[in-house]
Image (cartoon, rainbow, N blue to C red):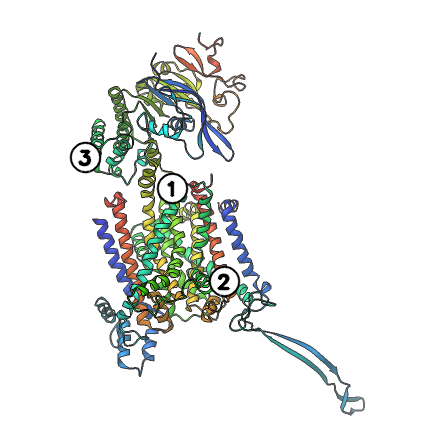
Amino acid sequence: MKYFLRKLGMLAFTLFVSISINFFIPRLMPGDPARALLDKMEGLPPEQIESVRAAFGLDTGDSLLVQYGKYLGNTLRGDLGVSFSRFPMPVTQVLRIAIPWTIGLLALCMVISFALGTAIGIAAAWKRETRLASFSVGFFSFIRSFPYFWLGLIFIYFFAFKLRLFPIGGAYAVTETRGSAAWWLSVLRHGTLPALTICVSSIGGWMLMMRNNMINVLAEDYITVALAKGLPLRRVKALYAAKNAILPSVTGFAMSLGFVVGGGLLTEMVFSYPGVGYMLYQAVNAKDYPLMQAIFLFIAAAVLVANFIADIAVMILDPRVRDGAA
Amino acid sequence: MGSVPTLELRDLRAGYSTKKGFVRAVDGVSFRLERGEFLGIAGESGCGKSTLAYAVMRLLRDNARIESGQVLFNGTDIAAMPEAGVNALRWTGMAMVFQSAMSALNPVLSVGEQLTDAVLAHRNATKAEAEAMAVEMLRLVDINPDRLRGYPHQLSGGMKQRVMIAMALILKPDLLIMDEPTTALDVVVQRSIIEKIDELRRALGFSVVFITHDLSLLVEISDSLAIMYAGKICEYGRSRALFDEPLHPYTEGLMGSFPTLTGPVVRMGGIEGRAPDLLSPPPGCRFAPRCARAFEGCGREDPALRDIGGGRLCACRLREPGREGGRR
Amino acid sequence: MIKDFFLTLVRNRKSLAGLCILAFFVFVAAFAPLLAPHPAKADRVVTTRLVKAETGDPETVAEGEASDVREVETYRVTTVREYEKTTDYFPLKAKPGKGHPLGTNHAGQDLFSQLVWGTRVSVSVGLATGLFVTLLSLTLALVAGYAGGILDDVISFFTNVFLVIPGLPLIIVIAAYVAMKGVLPIVLILGLTGWPYPTRLLRAQVLTLKNRDFVRVSRSLGERPSFVIFREILPNMISIVMAEFFASSMAAIMGEASLEFIGLGNVTVVSWGTILYWAQANGALLSGAWWWFLPPGLCIALLGTAFVLVNFGIDEISNPRLRKR
């Protein structure tokens, strides 16, 4: 229980820090872009100035502390300001369009690459001496050093451009009516290459980590005991080896979540996939600061929540953590 | 004796393949273990005792293997037996208690699960029946059956070791091999564990091979003792006789290495030097470089384990018949 | 001990391969001026040659007697030098061919030269950031691990907090506000966002070592903390610090390339990432100009693989279980 509360507390505090980062970054940067922005806005429609105010909590009269308080209040109420580039849409509304695409893509990919990577890692460790195992280690290490976006470019080049098997970008065919079967089919088609990019890039990390963990676990005494007991190999592999080896992987999952999300962002940019990442790209180019910050906050919050879920998973799997022994 | 010995080793050789060659940790070991007998194997670290234990249980993996020789369990040679046959014997015929109970218990499975899965793997029992057996074993080792649902990290060192003993005996094997089971425990707990093992042996009738580097433990509870050095047995005999009159210089050194609680204060002996490298052992007697009583014949020929009479075996030129110091 | 470490690294096949690749790139980076056929941003070759050089005969302009014993004569010699300046503009978006093994980009700049010059920037940014992050996180780890107490609690707490905040989005947001002059901002941004993970790792190692007997003996003998840290703890951490350095460098190279690809880096600096940026901005992909976007990415991948290989070697050295048997 104490573990649970502690992790919950961390979640809340880190969220708070993320929100604060959003507040302070524009103010801490050399040249005070927030102020400069406000100056640049002289003569713009009052609603747009208001959106800057909401995004930055800027009010020329108030002290920093009051601004901060107003900003926190606004954020917690869900008011993250109005987008510059899609004026006068509020930022949250803009986000809502993009979020499902990103979550769909990333969630699917992470599950697939974690599951596959872990399975391959277990196999590679169990049958260490085989050629296939050594080859897969080298292969995945090489794949892992590919920049996400570059892998995406290569896939586009080969599969979309040269072979014309898949579309070059976008999430769905605009020619189909939304919700129809053909439309869903086009969604799958459009999503294949981005999904492939993310999966291929991240699978290597899981696989290598799991292989390492398994090798360490297989050297433990309780594995020898399990074999001495004459237990069926399947049980030894699953309940004695894998169940122990997966614990550091789950923690590692939480930590590399941010990394995979970053990769997902880049992939979206390359494929013009209308998710949160591509939106961030457009926001940066259009200097739409409120949107940029809101996206950052959303991503941070999502990663933190996912981390929290991973912590809960560890709690369920590892009895030592449950008792506070670990 | 008439009955088939529980365990008989005939010239067993086993070791590890390394880049530099084969390290023969067990180099021609032979002995007999009768039904219900308690054999202690003593020797310093690296003499090959653990390799011996693993070889008997057919647990040598990766680059370790049995090179040659026979391991007769209840009369059947299991050294070259296919895996399936050996697996059937595992835990049902022979079981092992490992050195560090700390890491020998799976941290993510409950105590009960670890006790019952051995039963369920070898017998057609229901889960309830297996649990009943587990409860019975826990009671035998004086552990509260409530611990069944608990996890290893909730147990103390001594309790973990007792769980391991319960786990090993759950299928009532004929042979129990114990590889330094008390090394990581304090002396008081050591005593209770040893006494418990003795008690269980009398109740259930299994044979024990008890491996340790601490001779003092063995002397009181074992029936026979084998002293191992550099992969070979250098002395063997009934415990009391061996203790009263050690024949091999190494055994003498070991005896002189632990103080007695009673009697006059004696200058401690100890044995100088280090065990030989088993990758390329020296010609002749392996203990000769460290032996205070070595003579030039010792370095030439490796003395065989010879029956000196009275059930005593010794591998030392000094004890050869005809030499002074030898026996009739 | 450091020498032993490097010797073992060289003996391990995987890390040797990695080190060779790394050495290759460092070599290219160092000798870029000699290896690149053109300056990075050159879009033309200007050759000047002397066509005619004529010196005329002396012409007397004035002469006279300044005094009885002095004559002054002024004469003029006119020299004419005629030059022919040939400016060969590189073709725009050319395919690989004569003179341009990797073709040219949208501004007519030679892509091969850019790749070579870009190696300098990418490798130095990567290694510099790696060094920065390693030093920063090592310092924090040593302070937190050794000092313990409240200092440790505070540092650990903030490490854990910043560890879970996703890196790339944060980098993007910060970079969007910063005016990129040169590459120093990138190094700083990457460094200041990349410290939590190594810090946590190194701190764990410091704690393990601190509780080992040889350190305890040292401390109970009353050795100064600086002695304990620098002579007892640090030398035993070399392999993990090196592993961290290589991992951070790899992350930095990826991060830098990513930032530049998005356009948040300094697009006037030529590096592997900016080459990709311009490739993307000019639709290289869609016009099938694989020679534009393939080589820079391949270089990043190769350099990344080099770091991974070295780390494999380090892993096998410090964890014998992982070694081949």
Q: Secondary structure at mark 1?
A: helix
Q: Out of A258 and C170, give the one closest to the viewer.
A: A258
Q: Chain of mark 1?
A: A
Please name which of the two marks, 1 or 2, marks the residue nearer to the observer.
2
* CA distance for labels 3 and 1: 32 Å
Q: Out of C212 and A254, give the one closest to the viewer.
A: A254
Q: Which residue is mark 1?
A: A216
Give how far across and how far down residue B116 sits, in percent.
Answer: 25, 33
Q: Same chain for the residues at labels 3 and 1, yes or no?
A: no
Q: Out of A243 and A179, give the one closest to the viewer.
A: A179
Q: Which residue is mark 3?
A: B146
Residue B315 horizontal side relative to residue B263, left or right: right
Q: Out of C13 and B214, give the one closest to the viewer.
A: C13
Residue B160 horizontal side relative to residue A216, left or right: left
- The kind of residue tagged 3 is Asp
Q: Which residue is mark 2?
A: C294
